[in-house]
Image: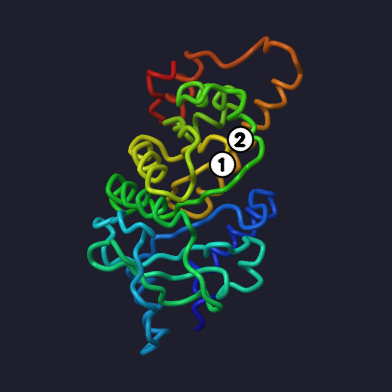
Amino acid sequence: MKIAELPFVKEFVRLCSIGDAQGFHERNGGNLSYHMRPTEAKAVRGILGAKKPGPWTDVDPKGDVAVPGLGGEWFLVTGSGKFFRNVAYDTEASVAICELDKEGAHYRVRWGLRDGGRPTSEFSSHLMNLEVKDRLSGGRVRVIYHAHPANLIAMTYVVPLTDRDFTRALWNTMTECPVIFPEGVGVVKWMVPGGREVAVATSKLMETYNNVVWAHHGLFCAADTFDNAMGQMETIEKAAKIVMLVLSSGRKPLTGISSDGFLAIGRMYGGDIPERFL
């Protein structure tokens, strides 16, 4: 079997295609990473055989990022400057399977990026978030998906950039929202992407949330499966579209879901609705 035919690679490619079809990935916008399971890494090693790996490279160009909690692990990740629309067309040129060293400070490419290059410029953000989620979920959360959904980005210009304001605005649009993300969403005010500062800020919020808004930029989603990562992205973007439609009407909303309503949703569906959002 070829690596591109392995089930987890096909699921990865499918998410990229869906995200591109949704319009979430202009040009080379957005990125996706997957923390491979030991059985998947073993399968890849078996296919690679004696093929020589690439050189060890700093996880962060400045050399100040390490994720020791993920030392020695393997990851599938989109490449820097690569287009989501091309992942299905030429997978081996668009993505990379990377191995971390035992300290979690360096990676080497084991497969992919056939024509050269490196993993996404936000690889350090992905790894720092995956390290947090691996610890909190006991290894269950393995997907980090970052996209640029237009309505959510538009929201960051008209809704106060706080966790509470964003969460309440999104929750109030559809009953499904507090079911799908009952913990709410976190918000990072604008920072230059790709650096350690935004990676640290996002990973701190991932201690509490599975979805983090980057103001004037996009959304980071953490999930246990590719389907759930895309489901979170689609749900939050649809809610943001409703927010923007209501605001564009020029009328003050006459109705909405009350705090008691959110608590009732939580009781019905088993979600723990945080008191700070009520």
- Residue 218 circle label: 1
Q: Residue at x 62, y 23 (%)?
A: 158
**Residue closest to the eye, 184 or 219:** 219
- Residue 184 circle label: none
How many numbered discs sit on the rendered protein? 2
Q: Is residue 239 left or right of residue 103?
A: right
- Residue 152 circle label: 2
Question: Compared with residue 170, is residue 26 higher up or lower down, i.e. above or below?
Answer: below
Q: Is residue 136 left or right of residue 8?
A: left
Question: Compared with residue 1, is residue 265 higher up or lower down, i.e. above or below?
Answer: above
Q: Residue at x 47, y 13 (%)?
A: 260
- Indicate the amino acid at tag 1: Gly
Q: Residue at x 63, y 42 (%)?
A: 149
Q: Is residue 91 left or right of residue 37?
A: right
Q: Residue at x 52, y 63 (%)?
A: 78
Secondary structure type for disc 1: strand
Asked whether the residues under the numbered discs 2 and 1 touch, taking CB atoms below 8 Å apart as contact, a structural biologist would say: yes
- Indicate the amino acid at tag 2: Leu
**Residue closest to the eye, 179 or 73:** 73
> Where is residue 202 drawn, in percent x and y?
40, 41
Question: Compared with residue 194, is residue 108 higher up or lower down, i.e. above or below?
Answer: below
Secondary structure type for disc 2: helix
Pointer 2 local density, CA inside 10 Å: few below 14, some 14–19, many at least 20: many
> Where is residue 103 drawn, in percent x and y?
23, 63
Q: Is residue 166 left or right of residue 64?
A: right
